[in-house]
Image (cartoon, helix red, strand yellow):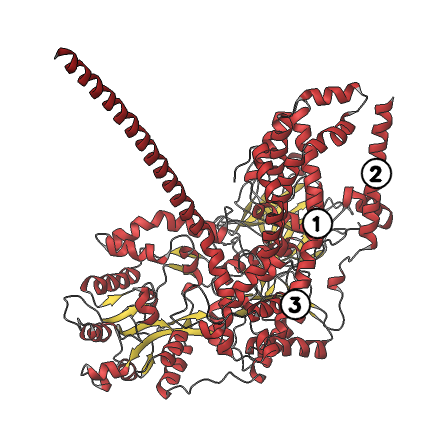
Amino acid sequence: MRSRKFKNKVVATLVIFSLLLSLFLVANNNIQKAEASSKLGDILFLRPDFSENNLKGTDRGSKVMALAVKEYQERYGGKVKFVFADYNGWRTKLLAMAAAGTPVDVISVWETDIPSFYTRGLIQPVDNYVNLKAPYFDQNAMENFKYKGRHYAVVGKGASVPWGVIYNKDLMLEEGIDESEMPYELFKRGRWNWDTFEKLAKKLTADTNKDGKVDRYGVTFWNGMVLAYFNGTPFVGIDKNGNVKLNFDSGALQRALNFYRKGVKEGWLTTDWNIVSSGMKKRQTAMLVAPYYKFDQDRRDCDDEILFAPQPFGPDNKNKYYHFVLGIAWAIGKGCKNPAGAGKFIEIMHEADQKVPQDPAPPLPKEVTEAVNVMAKKPFYFYAADSYLLTVIPRWEILGAIESADSVAAGLASLRPRAEKAIKETFYGTGTKPIIREFKPFAVNFDDGKIDKIKAYDPNKKTVKFTLVSGKEAIKGKSLKVTWDASKDGNEIYILTDPSKIKVYGWHDYKVSFDIKVMKNIKPGSTKVVCSILSEPKVGATSYGSVSKNIDRGQTVYRVEGNITNIQDNSENMCLRIGVQNGGDFIIDNIKVEELK
Amino acid sequence: MKSIKVLKLDQIHQSIKMDELTMSIIRKNILRILKKLFLYTFIVCMSYILLYPVLFLISNAFRAKEDLFDPSVIWIPKHITLANFEYANLLLSYPTAIKNTLIMLIPSVIIQTFICMMVGYGFARFRFPEREILFGILLFTIIVPIQTIIVPLYVKFRYFDFLYLGRLIGLITGKPLTVNLLDTPWPFYILNLFGMGIRSSLYIFVFRQFFRNMPTELEEAAKIDGCGPFSTFIRIMVPNATGAIITVMLFTIVWHWNDYYVSTMFNNENLPVSVMLTILNTRMSMLQAAQGFSSDDIYLLGSTVLEAGCLMVMLPLIIMYIIGQRYFTESIERTGIVG
């Protein structure tokens, strides 16, 4: 009896507690206020380690942001709401917010993120929201982040940094090298290549204290892997559709790594980090291959005259791309509440960047400015895909394998299994790896008198017949007539495009249209024309999308139009399926499939 | 002649015995000294390893700008200053951050300790068919990192619907009533309430082990006196579990205090002190405006201010440990937890 009373008390307490809690929560409710908008509306902004408090900072970056936030509010009436995340967890927070249906509007991105954010559907094209032709955007840089013809990241001018050769002019003069034979002069005369680079490095390598050991290297590399980039090839390639593949079999990559191996073995090239960090100052290296900001630091630290020359191209870099790293770029979250506001804020940030005065810095030598300007015309972000390899296999391990193996090919072979796994997992998770193939829009109107591009869906329905009709019976010119014996094969018949003649691929979004006229057995309300894309031309294949139209009248031409999207399939045998449900013979024409813009 | 010889032999034997005794005493003493020497050397070495970072923090936190590049200053600064603490206080927004931390921490610690104790008692004392399976699942949650479930948790708290009451209301209003609990300490409280807080499963395990070792006679006596299970737990078991409670509470406080991953995920504002510390460096430029420092000054001060900030964040925990040290070590002995 007593225990029953106690139980009742517990249950009652729990119920009261839950009700009170709910009431409290409801009263406290801050339901979706974050999305309240006015004019262009509020936007959510995410940049790792950046919170509203940073706007109080007095460094240039903070001033730019503070001005942009103020101007956005003044011009568009919306607030910029800062989403806080640190560098370790910002990608997870981005995912969590997207999963919660509140994707971030403006996201700071780096070249290492853009391809995977694109393939994972976290960002959307910026073309419709940002005036990409504005003078403060780096058109050349943005070309690198264009997939299927649309831009996915906005890069401001000066937001990316080239790699190049930092060299000690005074030291070279002391070693008897004529100014005309120095890197920048060689570059200007079109003679700056791996041969002249190697020759110079060998000449400057020395044992200055005569103890039998090299104590001054001709060239030091911040990262030896960049030789592959100077030769125009990354370790992992991304094509214009965002497809990723390992380049280990590439001759260009192997030649670049052979050059690196040769330099290390012959002793004129090193990647010793102590020399990278202070070797220019201590004269332990005559040349240093590093990002531009290292030049900016070294020229302030060194007593000698330090200059910067472009990267020497390898023999395979036919496109003459220069290796750049992205300081920061901006993207718009897919499905975000305010893409228009996001676009405007990105523009305002770059405008603010023009308005806030630059920090004082010693003037740059003319040749350095020229070198940087030349490189900025053809930037390429080789780290974009390689960084995913590097998160699993560190660069010293890659270079170590190249140095210690019997050959470059053997070194790469030892890395291959891990590299392939790394790419698969980092780019595509454990799901399907998208194979993106080029799609060509097509139209079938039967005016050429051929019906061989169309076939029957179900081979068991033997009475289905295709005939070409023209004149009044046709929809326009010549059309395809599909007839069958409904008593044997029922009132539902489909036709397919022949995958050997017409190619439809997954990972594209399509706009489909056709004209159709159902001839008989119309049952208003239940007769329907349907269209979808199949993974292969057979009964039971996976179907993607559905475009349909109800048919109420016979002998009447209906125009059917619709979109089929989200086709996550790698099949090469995909086809378009069109059919009639609860109807009879039909005539079809002007089947058109194009990429959805 | 013969007797004299015998006497001599006896003397020799006796003297040998004496020598052996002395030697054994000396040997024992040497061994004892060596043991002590080894022990002290070991303790000193271990203390050095453990204390080195703290000593380094203290040395740097009190160091003035002038001493930063003075090669003669190694451990003890020539110019001792409290300015670094002042700057860290400004950059951490220390009082606000501490307030935010305490708002999250105090209820969380109380809820988590009580809930874990109750669940641990249940596992220790009640026999039910699914007990072993449930306990296995509980142990499994120890090895599941929070990172793997953080996205669903985020979504859950973004559209929180307690006991589906929001959906019930939705049946009337046509739109489910959900509440955004992000940027509030409620996700911590709720997770702790359902045994899903930071390392809750570990504490449940601790309490289970503790209650299993308690004599059943106590509960039997309580039962005879008319106590039900819940009453027995509250009146008999809880007062006897002080040791385990203190241990778990201390761990709970430390882990909640140091947590920054979950706090970063659930908060954009009201950041706790641990998160503020992680972003201290990025806020250094605020000193330019507040103190009129140049960029070079900011660069120079970076490490000393960060170390002062670290000390400030550690300080409450150190004070707490000093006060609670006796209970903590006692309770560790009782509950059998090491480390």
Amino acid carrying mark 2 in the image:
Val
Q: Which mark is residue A15?
A: 2
x%, y% of residue A300?
38, 81
Q: Secondary structure at mark 2?
A: helix
Q: Nearer the viewer, residue A311 or A128?
A: A311
x%, y% of residue B5?
15, 15
Q: Which mark is residue A339?
A: 3
Q: Nearer the viewer, residue A279 or B211?
A: B211
Q: Secondary structure at mark 3?
A: helix
How many residues crowd mark 3 within 10 Å: few (<14), some (14–19), many (20+)? many
How many residues crowd mark 2 within 10 Å: few (<14), some (14–19), many (20+)? few
Amino acid carrying mark 1 in the image:
Ile
Residue plotted at (34% across, 38% down): B34
Dot 2 and dot 1 within a common chain: no
Amino acid carrying mark 3 in the image:
Pro
Dot 3 and dot 2 within a common chain: yes
